Image (cartoon, grey):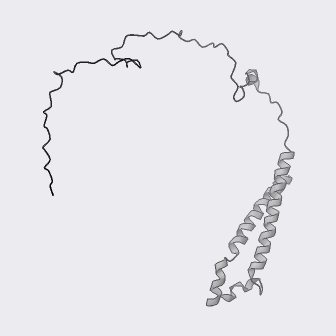
Amino acid sequence: MLMLTLNVIYVLVAIAIIALVLMQRGSGAAAGSGFGSGASGTVFGARGASNFLSKSTKWLAVVFFGISLFMAWQASHSARPVVQQNLGIMADQPVAPAAGELPAKVPSTVPSAPITAPVVTPSTVPTAPAPGAPAQATPANTEAAPAKPAASQPAKPSQEG
């Protein structure tokens, strides 16, 4: 019941702080007093609203943080230890291993195909030569690619001058 009451007061104080902050004039509002709006702050007295609103905001903020700290302290000290619940069939299940710990090997009841080594077949793709071995010279296939003419680009004119 105490926490419910504090939560209601907490929300009301938060709304009041928001309202008081929105009612306060900014620092640039004093510049308008030279142009004829100097009497706008007379509702709260001769000194204006800044003194009343700033003090009210300060004390509501103190109450807000006090309630916050008390509710956090109350929640941490009133926490009850976890009671073992009746989990039914789930109580028979093994506990998951901790982070970084490898799980124990448990034989599986799921059928699986036997594990066999892959069969290596000769590949038609040539392999790279071993390091240090000389590269074999292969004759150029002249039938596959036509010969390129020697002078395929026009000669550049010489620039003198």
* Placement of 45 over or under 128, stated as above or below: below
Residue at 79% from the left image edge and 67% from the top image edge:
60
- Left/right placement of residue 5 relative to residue 122 reads right
Quarter of image, res 112: top right
x, y percentage for residue 148? 15, 31
x, y percentage for residue 41? 71, 84
The residue closer to the viewer here, 32 or 17, is: 32
Q: How many callouts does the rendering have?
A: 0
Residue at 78% from the left image edge and 77% from the top image edge:
52
x, y percentage for residue 119? 44, 9
Quarter of image, res 145: top left
* Placement of 51 over or under 36, stated as above or below: above
The residue closer to the viewer here, 65 or 31, is: 31
The residue positioned farthest toward the front in the image shown? 161
* Placement of 74 over or under 28, stated as above or below: above
- Quarter that holds the C terminus: bottom left
x, y percentage for residue 29? 65, 81
- Left/right placement of residue 143 relative to residue 29 reads left
The residue closer to the viewer here, 118 or 137, is: 137
Residue at 34% from the left image edge and 17% from the top image edge:
126
Quarter of image, res 86: top right
The residue closer to the viewer here, 131 or 119, is: 131
- Left/right placement of residue 30 relative to residue 74 reads left
